[in-house]
Image (cartoon, rainbow, N blue to C red):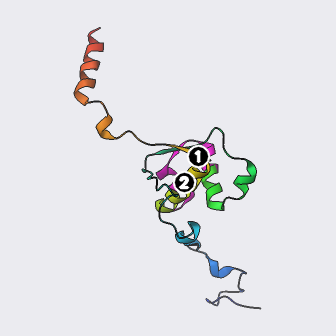
Amino acid sequence: MNEDSTGGGPAVPGGQWYDADAGPLVRPYAMTGGRTRPGPSNVRFDLIALVVVDDDPPGAAEEALLGPEHRSLLALCRAETQSVAELAADADLPVGVVRVLLGDLLESGFVRVSRPVPPAQLPDERILREVIDGLRAL
């Protein structure tokens, strides 16, 4: 019987890809196919951008072709709308990997992403206070 390299007992088939303390040892570049940018359009995902499953996603046959990490992100999005940061935390994946995988899902039509409103487009605080004061005066 083979023993593992630590001498701690029998070797587990495929054990070189698993560490008891760290979990699966799949490198991020393996999950993304070596890519560091999301999709051919190089869309940028903010950490607070909200991701939802598209109302009319591709069929089950197309979803079966996705990798396990893609399907994991889809399952998390089906449960509830989540931000990119929440998806990374819940999937236990680096944010860079999640951005690349979301780019794939967006390009394939599985998800929609609503980007946050830039601060320059938000109303001025002074105007909001005047509106509140006006409503209180009524």
Going 63% across and 90% down the picture, which residue do you hit? 5
50 lies left or right of 71: left
The residue lying at 61 percent from left, 75 percent from top is: 20
Q: Secondary structure at mark 2?
A: helix
Residue 66 in the figure: left or right of residue 122? right
Q: Would you say residue 4 is visible in this rendering?
A: yes
Residue appearing at x 64%, y 90% in the figure: 7
Label 1 amino acid?
A: Val
Tell me if label 1 and label 2 are in contact, CB under 8 Å: yes
CA separation, marks 1 and 2? 8 Å
The spot of residue 121 in percent (x, y) is 32, 35
* Neighbours of disc 2 within 10 Å: few (<14), some (14-19), many (20+): many
Label at residue 36: none
| First in sequence: mark 1 vs mark 2 | 2
Q: Which residue is mark 1?
A: 111
Q: Secondary structure at mark 1?
A: strand
- Dot 1: few (<14), some (14–19), or many (≥20) neighbours within 10 Å? many
Amino acid type assigned to the residue bearing label 2 in the image: Leu
Quadrant for the N terminus in the image = bottom right
Q: Which residues are magenta?
A: 75-94
Q: Nearer the viewer, residue 10 or 29?
A: 29
Residue 124, image x, y percentages: 25, 30
Residue indicated by mark 2: 102
Answer with the quarter of the image where residue 72 lies: bottom right
Note whether 77 is above or below 67 in the view shown: above
Q: Nearer the viewer, residue 132 or 5?
A: 132
Asked whether, in this view, residue 8 is left or right of residue 84, the answer is right
Figure label count: 2
Verify whether residue 28 appears in magenta: no
